[in-house]
Amino acid sequence: MGIGYWVLGCRYKLQITNYKLQVEIVNFTERYKTIIRIAMFAAAAILTAIVVPGEHGFRYDFRIGSPWAYSDLIASSDFPILKSEQQLKQDRDSVINSLKPVYRQDSVAPVFAAESIKRIFRLFNEKNKDHKLYPFYKDSIDDYRHLLLDITEEMYAGGVMLTHSGEASSIIVLQDNVAEERSLSECYTEKTAYDKLKNISERYKNGLYPSVRIDEIVKANLIPDEDLFAKMKEDALSEVSLHEGIVQTGERIIAKGEVVNELKYRMLNSFREQVKNQTVVSVPGALHYLGQFVMFLMFFAVFYIALYIFERKAFESLKQIIYFIGGTLMYAMAAAIIARFDSVSPFMIPILILPVLTVTFFNAQTAILHHTLTVVVVSFILPNSFDFFIIQFISGFAVAAGMMHLRRRGQVLRMTLLVFVLQLILYPALLLVYENSFTKLDSEFILWALVSSAFLPASYPLVYVFERAFGFISEVSLIELADTNRPLLRDLSEKAPGTFQHSMQVANLAEDAVRKIGGNSLLVRAGALYHDIGKMLRPAFFTENQLSGKNPHDAFPPEESAKIIIEHVSQGLHLAEQHHLPAQICEFIVTHHADSTVRWFLHAYKEQHPEQPVDETLFRYSGHKPYTKEAAVVMMADSIEAASRSLKNYDKKTINELVDKLINYQISENLFTDTELTFSELGIVRQAFKDKLVNIYHSRIEYPE
């Protein structure tokens, strides 16, 4: 028993220690949040500067037909001028066409043919020697045999091949390890050899002559040597020079303002390769890294200021800053890897996923800012990336504008098709600007555009991952949370039906009002449905659920009743935690009463104890003021909907007076000071509540029985 208590005591002390450590970390983070935030952006600039490839000697962007926008470029060392791809292909084709096919001459085929002819005539003579006409044909038969042998020997000496080889006029023949060039006019094909012997045999067709099977005699004795020809081809191609001319040290490569023509383009490419090869074996200096750090620091500083101005809530959250910085760094590293491989297109970088995620969790303005920063950083890392910047910047803008409200999978598929078509339009348009023609249109770009746009559907499942990782909430999740068939809302409707109906009415009121000031109506609806879930634990203590007319508060003193009422906030938070509701929804539970007092029970306590001082903390909610417009609108809608049920006359005047009275009281209590709600927006919300309540409680026609 003693050991058990000791273990429990140790566990309790450990929990207390962990709690204190967590509190200290939170306090430290809050105390030095600004310093931490600045350090994070500075660290991002340092990391980006480090991952940039070390091609610090050549950072120029140039195109054929465009003027050189930089100062005169002078060669720092000798370098050869690379041939163009077209010229190199022509040279290689010329070398290949100049090669002569190689054959090995077989010495067995002529011997076999001669022996076959001799055998045919020997057998014929033996068979027909007693024929009465044989003596008259004997000499002619011998002439026929000698003629076939002579012509066969002549043909095989020149060589017999299956067919003539391509367009070559001569071939190389190897015989007994001796190579000789032989004209094709000296060679026969099996067909021409067959035809020649066949013509001779036709002259001896009539009379006592042997029948000779020409097809059994004629066999090719020139056999192609493919392996040797391939080796000759490889050797010849290896000797084709990749260069054409040389630029010497100190020679001007191109002058400022000079138009980049074909030759200058090749010279610039050659110089870039020279610098790149030198960079591989050299280490960039400290000044190089310092320049890159300052450049990227400026990029991130602009985004830092933009977040502060346009997305203050994200600016205050270190976790959300990690999302922004981490996303940009991830693509910077991908670009650094892609830049090292000339064969891989930068359009393989799935950069369009970023605006989809950002617009889903924030808004189009923030998504465009984040995407622009990332595209600028990536374009700085990639060589000759102006095309990439233009195409991806415009595509990202279209994605951010077209997916502001990601609620259906069909939106992603439509945007994928739109981005694909948009990129197919932009690339040829840029080509027309630079080349004034479509002659250099790269068909591979269609594949890259397809791959680039095909990354968009991958963003849909990533939304769920980022929600869990960073505590975000998407419109798709809000739609799911607002489903009244979810277990928690179904429990609320069964255990506290009055509260459930109240929550539905609050959702309708708040959703209509917040939509008119440009707020997140889905977030408001979901938050309003869950804001009073804590009441289901003790529903009878709340008037909307008291159907029998009995009020259990009659049996409790005011301070106890106030405690029960106040506890529905903490109990609601406990239920929300059990059901894993997002923090954004929990915020509505905490803020819908803010830190106001339970005025009815506070007043009752004062009447019962007129002489005693009042501890108002016993009657004050433990929540805090709303931080967002959405939470403020739900707080207003909650009090207005509850109070509207007590009106005796539902007309425009009484409704207007009720709305004005409650909102003015909340203003006097400074409940909106932490939100970005303006007086103009407050007026719009006020009027929206009045119009909605008038529509709900409008007088109805009494139909006769």
Image (spheres, grey):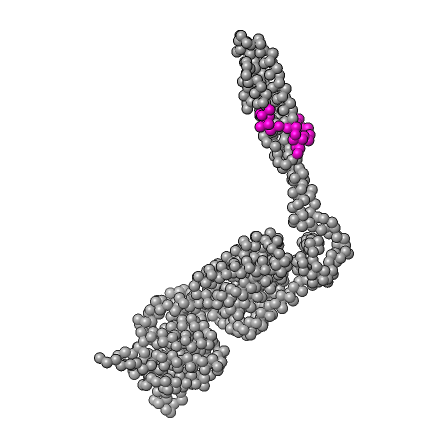
Residue in view at x 55 percent, y 9 percent: 133
Q: How many marks?
A: 0
Q: Is residue 10 visible?
A: no
Asked whether residue 342 is drawn in magenta, I would say no
Residue in view at x 58 percent, y 11 percent: 138
Q: Taking 541 as reference, is 263 left or right?
A: right
Quadrant that contains the N terminus: bottom left
Image quadrant assignment for residue 120: top right
- Above or below — where is 436 with respect to 186? below
Residue 440 placed where, x, y %?
Answer: 61, 54
User: As drawn, which residue projects farthest toward the bottom?
Assistant: 611
Residue closest to the eye, 639 or 129: 129
Q: Is residue 82 visible?
A: yes
User: As drawn, which residue projects farthest toward the left?
Assistant: 705
Residue 282 placed where, x, y %?
Answer: 69, 55
Residue closest to the eye, 42 or 387: 387
- Above or below — where is 422 with respect to 701? above
Residue 57 placed where, x, y %?
Answer: 69, 58
- Residue range in magenta is 169-196
Q: Taking 690 as reference, is 125 left or right?
A: right
Residue in view at x 51 percent, y 69 percent: 364
Residue in view at x 59 percent, y 54 percent: 441
